[in-house]
Amino acid sequence: MSVSSTTTARPGAGGTVGAPRSRGSFPDAGTTGVPAGVTLKAATTTSLRIRKAGTVIDRADIRGEISVEANDVTIKNSRVVNAGNWGIVQRPEVKGLVVKDSEIRGNGKERLQYAILNLGSGDISILRNDISQVSDALSTNVGLIEGNYLHDPVYFDGDHTDMIQSNSGPPAGQRLVIRRNTVVNTLEQTAAIALFQDFGVQHDATIEHNLLAGGGYALYAGSGMKGTSYNIRVIGNVFSREVFPKSGQYGAVAYWDKAGNGNVWQDNVWAGTGRAVTAD
């Protein structure tokens, strides 16, 4: 579904203030996306509906969406460019989607709301992808997000931009793990990583060894109106000043439940100095 819209000036001039970029060994364009040497198939404007369990999509070049309607689908070494609600969606009651070594982005002129959206509570793995030119890059309450480069969102009227977004805790016995990603929101709102309580208490999330920058706050850490968050582990992350002097426009972190059972804030530091980032 294509949605035409006029891009407005983004709120804030994030990239013009703050410290020089220093990303070290964190993921970037050279270590994510379609691997060097992989030749994509001829581009197609046909959107895909995947209804067979275990389907593997490899080396595809899609100008449209991929709707995953069966379990244990893998999308790898591919490019998805779209406008509308999403690039890739895992439907309710479906689980096991793996998206890896791929590029997912908007066309830069029309809104792409989500690069990858997990509509249900099924597990998902998002690995080593290069994602850009979106309103919201990733939205899931459960699964593994590791080794990705998320950057350069595009602002449209009414957007509240998050590069990684969770709206509730995961199903019982499961976890959301966000590990070793580069997550840069060059807008002044809302976050690089956001754990919201739109639909339930945040719990059982691990955010570790990521490079974070931008948004209103680089990290929304799980506190909210539904109750006290618990088992939220924020460990070893590096907060960069490459977008704003405080990492986010207003600061590095907000909405941290210090007293939540099992909540851990540990070894989180500022890029360049190694000084501790505190969560009050």
Image (cartoon, helix red, strand yellow):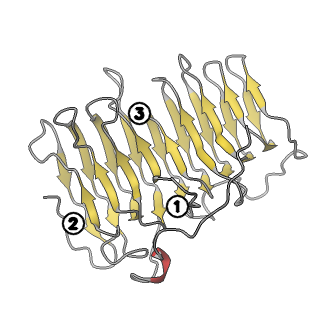
Type of amino acid at the residue the image marks with label 2: Val
Q: Residues within 10 Å of mark 2 (few under 14, many from 20)?
A: some
How many numbered circles are shown?
A: 3
User: Which numbered disc flags the more N-terminal residue, 1 or 3?
Assistant: 1
Q: Which residue is mark 3?
A: 141
Q: Is residue 147 left or right of residue 154?
A: left
Query: For the residues carrying marks 2 and 3, which lies nearer the camera in this image?
Result: 3
Disc ID at residue 257: none
Structural distance between the alpha carbons of marks 1 and 3: 22 Å
For disc 3, the neighbor class at 10 Å (few under 14, some 14 to 19, many from 20) is: many
Q: Looking at the image, which is closer to me, 142 or 187?
A: 187
Instruction: Specify the quadrant that holds the C terminus.
Output: bottom left
Q: Viewer-proximal residue, 11 or 203?
A: 11
Q: Secondary structure at mark 2?
A: loop
Instruction: Please name the residue that numbered disc 1 is placed on.
Output: 27
Going 49% across and 23% down the picture, which residue do you hit?
A: 122
Q: Position of residue 197 (x, y in %)?
A: 30, 37
Above or below, comparing residue 43 to residue 123 in the picture: below
The first of marks 2 and 1 along the sequence is 1
Separation of disc 2 and disc 1 at Cα? 21 Å
For badge 1, the amino acid type reads: Pro
Which residue is labeled 2 in the image? 277
The quarter of the rendered structure image containing the N terminus is top right
Q: Residues within 10 Å of mark 1 (few under 14, many from 20)?
A: many
- Indicate the quadrant where residue 132 lies: bottom right
Residue 128, position as x, y percentages in the image: 57, 50
The answer to whether residue 4 is left or right of residue 237 is right
Q: Which residue appears at 83% of the width and 48% of the height?
A: 40
Q: Is residue 231 left or right of residue 239?
A: left
Q: Residue 71 appears at what percent x and percent y?
A: 61, 19
